[in-house]
Image: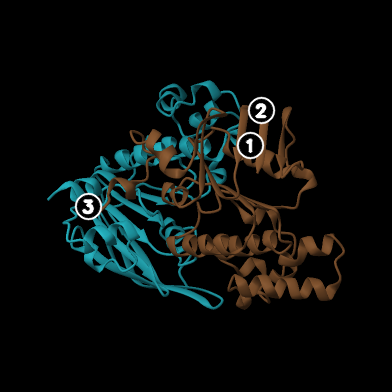
Chain colours: A cyan, B brown
Amino acid sequence: MKLHFNAVRANRGDWSLAAQGTFCEGMHLVSGDVGSGKSTLALMIAGLFSPTVGSIVSDGISSKMISMQFPEYHVTGLTVAEECRSWGLDSDPILSGINLNHKRDVAPLTLSRGELKRLHLACVLAKKYDLLLLDEPFSSLDAREKERLCEILSQRTGGITILFTHEQTCFPQVDHIWEIQQGELFDRGEMPEALTRWMHAPTLIKKIISSGKILKNISPSDLQEAVCRT
Amino acid sequence: MIVMSGLRCRNIRIDSLTIPHGITSVIGPNGSGKTSFLRLCSGITEPEAGEILIDCKKPRETDVGWVNEFPDKNILFSRVSDEIASCLRFSHRPCSEKDSAVLAIAETMDIMHLLDRTMRELSGGEKVLVALAAALVQRPKILVLDEYDSHLDETRCFQIEHILRSCAVPYVIRCTQQMETAARGDYLLYLEEGSLLYNGSPARVFASLCQTPFYPLSWRCEV
């Protein structure tokens, strides 16, 4: 499975984004500041936004899913249980897994934002997709849920998963890092070599690297392990 | 001081709490009542029982600035300068006073270049900055920020942190899911299921949370 960006450019007024490269199977992190074009890139890959020039070609990808930043955009059910069923899922195990069984009969839009994000991600991650796009999956989640999501994503196998985020501390284990800077998508390469090329790495990661510690990956446990290692 | 006593509203149950001057962060699991708590502090919601006094006045008798997690929800005008001036206009301040106040806050926050742009053109981070300017332009006594940082990158977070420190608002109350941000505040509240479990300095509250994921990762990874 592969996803090719062939001289892609998206223009919107004065703003533009250029992308070239290939996403192979594994967990990819696309980082970049707010407004850099992470969501636009995700929408282009999902086929919801057309590049102005160039093409995005899928190779061997038969199923894909995009999880948008705002979970409200995905809601179709009138109750929490119905929302699970709208994804073709049995609501009982899904809601037990995210501790929302007691809210099964309430309207999804009456949940707190973090609870709604939890529900949405549980539905998305319950299925396997060849290509999974997660746009800011950590926003609105509390610290416990962020850690839980990192563990689930770190265990994900098969297919291409692309994580678009400006999160600063909580990441799953990733295979490849990309970065959007000044209107261009840069391939920082495979882990762990990508870490030295990651220009806008979060302060904590930069600090650990500059202290001479060897970082194998960027999940919370990798960071702690690197710091504890002498 | 902000003094709360016998506070009851929806799932919020706080018997007694005093919040000092400075930046207070509110943290807790999703659904713990952080937004409900902020709405009470800002006077958007009134308590079902008990009271909140901000320097002896109720929130609705106090000048309050509010920044929503999604600034789009609060946008009233299409032009940035009009948006920032909105509360001054609604209080019928003279045009000259309004214009100079907008320029002053834009200069302080380094967003002069945004003044003539339309709100629609702005990025998410820029919208938060404009919402913050609109909240600060009337020099509120209390500034309430509801997860303003959940859609911001690190650079923008540090920029806003700097603005909050230099704006001289007596009380800033913000909820956040970034524990590093919470650690930089002066005072910290930890809510769970509507109850206040811990309050005090960040060092003291995080000491009680050291076995949980709420403990700042940067503190665990001291290098």
**Seen in the image, is B183 located left or right of residue A205?**
right
The quadrant in which the C terminus of chain B is found is bottom left
- The mark lying in front, picked from 1 and 3, is 1
**Seen in the image, is A76 located left or right of residue B220?**
right
Helix, strand or loop at label 2? It is loop
Residue that badge 1 annotates: B36
The quadrant in which the N terminus of chain B is found is top right
> Residue A169: x, y in percent?
35, 51
Residue that badge 3 annotates: A217
Q: Quadrant of residue A38?
A: bottom left
A13 to B39, vertically: above or below: below
The local crowd at label 2, few if under 14, some if 14 to 19, many if 20 or more residues have their Cα within 10 Å, is: few
Q: Kindly identify the amino acid type of the residue bearing the numbered disc 3.
A: Asn
- Which tag, 1 or 2, sits closer to the chain's start? 2
In this rendered view, identify the residue nearer to me: A15 or B162.
Answer: B162
The span from disc 2 to disc 3 (Cα, nearest Å) is 43 Å
> Residue A119: x, y in percent?
48, 35
In this rendered view, identify the residue nearer to me: B45 or A49.
Answer: B45
Q: Are marks 1 and 2 in contact (CB under 8 Å)?
A: yes
- Disc 1 with disc 3 on a shared chain: no
Q: Kindly identify the amino acid type of the residue bearing the numbered disc 1.
A: Ser
A161 to A100, vertically: above or below: below
In this rendered view, identify the residue nearer to me: A160 or B59.
Answer: B59
- Disc 2 with disc 3 on a shared chain: no
Does any portion of residue A14 appear in the rendered image?
Answer: yes
**Seen in the image, is A194 located left or right of residue B58?**
left
Residue that badge 2 annotates: B10
The chain under label 2 reads B
Does any portion of residue A130 appear in the rendered image?
Answer: no
In this rendered view, identify the residue nearer to me: B103 or A123.
Answer: B103
